[in-house]
Amino acid sequence: MISQDVTDESIYRKSDGWRSVHHFIGEEIHLDSIDFTIAVEVIYLRVQNEDMQTYLAEQNAADPE
């Protein structure tokens, strides 16, 4: 499940008793069933919420090209 209002995504796995595991900016998500890993910030690149705007501003300040 991916939230659009904040950068928070949850994964529920049957093998883990359907316990929710949350991931946030700066973390990676690994989907075992398809052996795929993606950074949370990549999922949210085109989302215009406060969390992403803050993250992008911090990234631009750290890398002034």
Image (cartoon, helix red, strand yellow):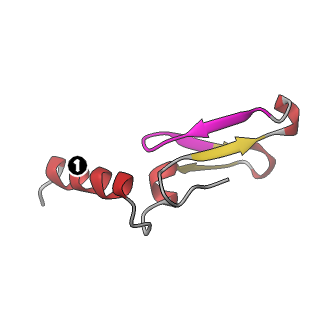
- The answer to whether residue 31 shows anywhere in this view is no
| Image point (44%, 44%), residue name | 25
The residue lying toward the viewer, choosing from 63 and 57, is: 57
Q: Evaluate whether residue 53 shows in this view.
A: yes
Q: Residues within 10 Å of mark 1 (few under 14, many from 20)?
A: few
Residue at mark 1:
58
- Please name whichever residue, 6 or 38, is drawn nearer the observer in this view of the structure: 6
Q: Which residues are magenta?
A: 19-29
- Residue 46 position (above or below residue 29): below
Left/right placement of residue 27 relative to residue 59 reads right
Asked if the magenta segment contains residue 22, the reply would be yes
- In this image, 6 relative to 63: left or right? right
**Type of the residue with mark 1:** Glu
The quadrant of the picture occupied by the C terminus is bottom left
Residue that appears at 47% across and 60% down? 44
In the image shown, does 17 or 41 lie closer to the viewer? 17
User: Residue drawn 22% across and 55% down?
Assistant: 57
